[in-house]
Image (cartoon, rainbow, N blue to C red):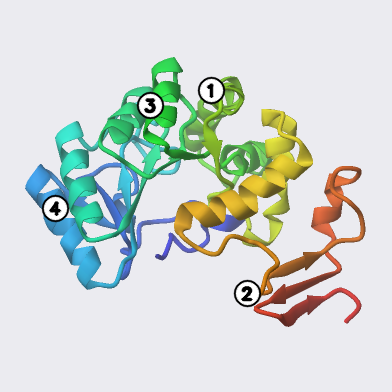
Amino acid sequence: MSVAAGIADGKIEGPRISAAGAVICMTGGHGWFLGRQVDSPWEARKAVREQLLAGATCIKFIATGGVLTHGAVPGNAQLTPDELHAGVDEAHRHGLRCAAHAIGTEGIKNALRAGIDSIEHGHMLDDEAIELFKRNDVYLVPTLTAPTCILEHAEDGKQPAWALEKARVVAREMQLNIARAYRAGVKIAGGSDAGTPYNFHDRYAYEIELMHRLLGMSPQEALHASTAVASALVGLTSGTLAPGEPADLLFLERDIAQDLATLYRPLAVLKDGSRIFDRAG
């Protein structure tokens, strides 16, 4: 799934249509330039079928506004409850996983009631949403780095004022609410929303650091959320060292319980048993 070129280095450029995106949104809504726009429950079903035909294995529904689409208000619900119910039902009938971009309170709960598998962001969740998360066994992917990185570079002049203001609102809500959800027992899975301004894939350790610093997770819990829990969410391997399991291994100098920053300086990385990175060269 493509994103607007240049966005990761702090620029917000014009829209580009994704040729293989599995994003479903309302017409003119947040992320309209990334995926399929729909305006009814039947269109939501048809859009899922189109994505199934294209080879998608996960459908992302845009349940609320967001930060990086001009005019979209993060707190506002977008896809209607009926559209979400229809789309999620159609996806699940075909064995597809369903995620929802959802920042605002109403949209979060609309997606949870529709049977979504995970909420991406969830920053304005309330007590009722927490109960729905737990009752429906839904994962929360808080993407703490997304607004944090935007605001850390607010003075560089590359981001429009409207995006910065929305990021400030989202960051305030995030710090108030996500830690509460974690303490209440909501399942937290790691995910960074990499591709948003200054939020790079190779700095994923920052998401783990923020889960520790902002949510109160222990370093081990934050790492577990970003490995085994995230793996379970997307249906990959369990992350265990055992015969028949892929040898995907990260080698560190120190125990993260004593030095979380060691994640930024890995010694080596093995993928399926093959060394793909070695700091020693």
Is 194 on the left or on the right of 36, as rendered? right
Instruction: Tell me the distance, in whole angstroms, between the alpha carbons under discs 1 and 4.
Output: 32 Å
Which residue is pictured at 63% across the width and 54% down the height? 227
Labels 2, 4: front one: 2
Above or below, comparing residue 247 to residue 14 in the picture = below
Assess disc 3: are there few (<14), some (14-19) or many (≥20) residues with their C-alpha within 10 Å of its C-alpha: some
33 or 144: nearer the viewer? 144
Give percent across and percent down for residue 95: 28, 60
> Which numbered circle lies on residue 173?
1
Instruction: Tell me the distance, in whole angstroms, between the alpha carbons under discs 1 and 3.
Output: 19 Å
Q: Which residue is mark 2?
A: 246
Q: Earlier in the sequence, mark 1 or mark 3?
A: 3
Above or below, comparing residue 246 to residue 60 in the picture = below
Q: Which residue is mark 3?
A: 132
Do callouts 4 and 3 mark residues in contact (Cβ within 8 Å)?
A: no
**SS label for mark 2:** loop
Instruction: Tell me the distance, in whole angstroms, between the alpha carbons under discs 3 and 2.
Output: 34 Å
Assess disc 4: are there few (<14), some (14-19) or many (≥20) residues with their C-alpha within 10 Å of its C-alpha: many
**SS label for mark 4:** helix
Is there any visible trace of residue 132 in the rendered image?
yes
Q: Residue furthest top?
A: 127
